[in-house]
Amino acid sequence: MRRNAVAVVGAAETTRLGVIPELSQLGLHADAALNAMADCGLSPKDIDGIATANETPVQLAHYLGITPTWVDGTSVGGCSFMIHVRHAAAAIEAGLAKTILITHGESGKSRVGNPPRSVHPQSLNGQFEQPFGPMGPPSMFTIPVLRYMKRYGVTEEQIAQVSVVQRQWAAMHPRATFRTPITTDDVLNSRMIAWPFRLLMCCLVTDGGGALILTSADRAKDFKTKPVYITGTGESVETPMVSQMEDFTSSRAFRVAGPTAFQQAGISVNDVDHLMIYDAFAHLPIYGLEDLGFLPRGEAAAFIAAGNTAPGGKLPLNTNGGGLSYMHSGMYGMYALQESVRQMRGTSPAQINGAKISVCHGVGGMFAASGTIIFTNDPA
Amino acid sequence: MAEPGRALPAPTPETQHFWDGTKAGELRLQRCDSCGKNYFPPRPFCPVCASRSVSVFKASGKAVLWSYVIHHRPVPGFTPPYAIAVVQLAEGPRMMTNIVECPQTPEALQLDMELEVVFEAQNDKITLPFFRPAKG
């Protein structure tokens, strides 16, 4: 794909984030979609492509009154929306659609209109993982980390620092769920969930949604919003079973998606002004920093603990507070994309002055999938 | 015996040999006849070279503790805190399991400790493979 041929022109989250029992999952998708259309002055008749996850594109097209010529129902977990952006950019370049809407909504906390989560006992997960007592991501996504800690000598205190630093960013965001500063001791004294992981090393569970609207760079110039160009993209998957990861200290899907995006963008990690790494749990930014090539293996935890990713640090990371403090509906990737777009528009409450390149890196499932999007506001 | 309520597997035609094996007191893996790769979970072809010529064999049952968490939340059939572990089998593949006959503490559960398989029947059809500290 060509760099900067497609841009985000509409971007919005749901009207509220947090606890929203008055809207179903489908309603949250729609609220976000309507806000994104209003953001860029479009109506459903202007949209000819739709992508979404959890709900089907059929549901959203019908509910919103859209007649698409292109649909994408890729649903591989919380990075599905990064992958939708990638597919949408390719589709617009190929002429399959002109204006594509990507929606997310999830009643993660209130559980209104969400299909129940279950693992079928005949699936590989149901046969070879579920009998041994995992109960959702807090007890699964965390399993590889002890191996990482032993290999590189990383401590629980260093992992706790990820949560501490991200809370500093969240404090700057009026819409963040948790804004009160925390200390390393607060994290290490919080309730044990799945040793070595404590409550404050795990993401929130909230309700919300978000939506993006993409069009060609040529058409983007006609919109009132500042175009945010897509300059690099990548995607991959590895395994649905965390026990079957090739390497417990690194994600293969990260190592494919990330470099693919950097290669397309024609940039190196030294060119990055702003970075989002999907943080369902506190170890994710550590794995992401290393697998994307920002740091050698084993050095990311110390890098974060030293304040390099904190406000004022040289590599601003998860500037909305992340899934650990901002919000996490279950499929957090859309909120990471929204913060990258805000940073490129210059409208984030935690704005990085002069930022021109933002990398947004997502994970799906338990290291099962990955999508990376590199944005720029300076396509020259 | 585990408490009632634990989620149990439902075998498929492609995995039946594994569950027949645990019931017979054997940990059965598969090996590619073409490239020699030992692999798990079960499938009727090699995930490295795609050969359909594969064999089932009895593994040694020896493993080392690769990684784990100690879960503190309630799950049907389990009494917290309990470890959810991944072991590395001597033949190469890794698998999720529980560690038995061992305190469920960070001090007792050391990565790379040597383990051996034990089998616990859950009902007439399903026997699960667990691992305990190796008795040398």
Image: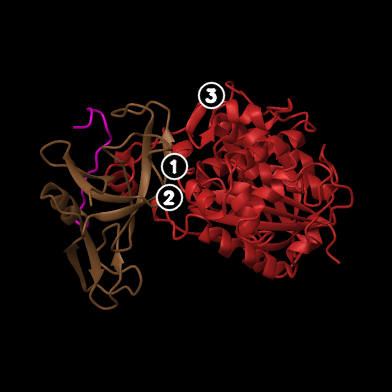
Chain colours: A red, B brown
- For disc 3, the marked residue is A110
The N terminus of chain A sits in image quarter: bottom right
The kind of secondary structure element at disc 1 is: loop
Q: Are marks 2 and 3 on the same chain?
A: yes
Going by the numbered disc 3, the residue's amino acid type is Ser
- Check contact, mark 2 vs mark 3: CB within 8 A: no
- For disc 2, the marked residue is A242
Q: Residue at x 24, y 43 (%)?
A: B9
The kind of secondary structure element at disc 2 is: helix
Find the residue positioned furthest to the top. A22
Q: Is residue B57 left or right of residue A177?
A: left
Q: Residue at x 12, y 47 (%)?
A: B23
Within the image, what quadrant is residue B127 found in?
top left
Disc 2 versus disc 3: distance between alpha carbons? 27 Å
Going by the numbered disc 1, the residue's amino acid type is Met
Sequence-first disc among 2 and 3: 3
Q: Is residue B13 magenta?
A: yes
Crowd around label 3: few <14 · some 14–19 · many ≥20 (10 Å):
many
The kind of secondary structure element at disc 3 is: loop
- Check contact, mark 1 vs mark 2: CB within 8 A: yes
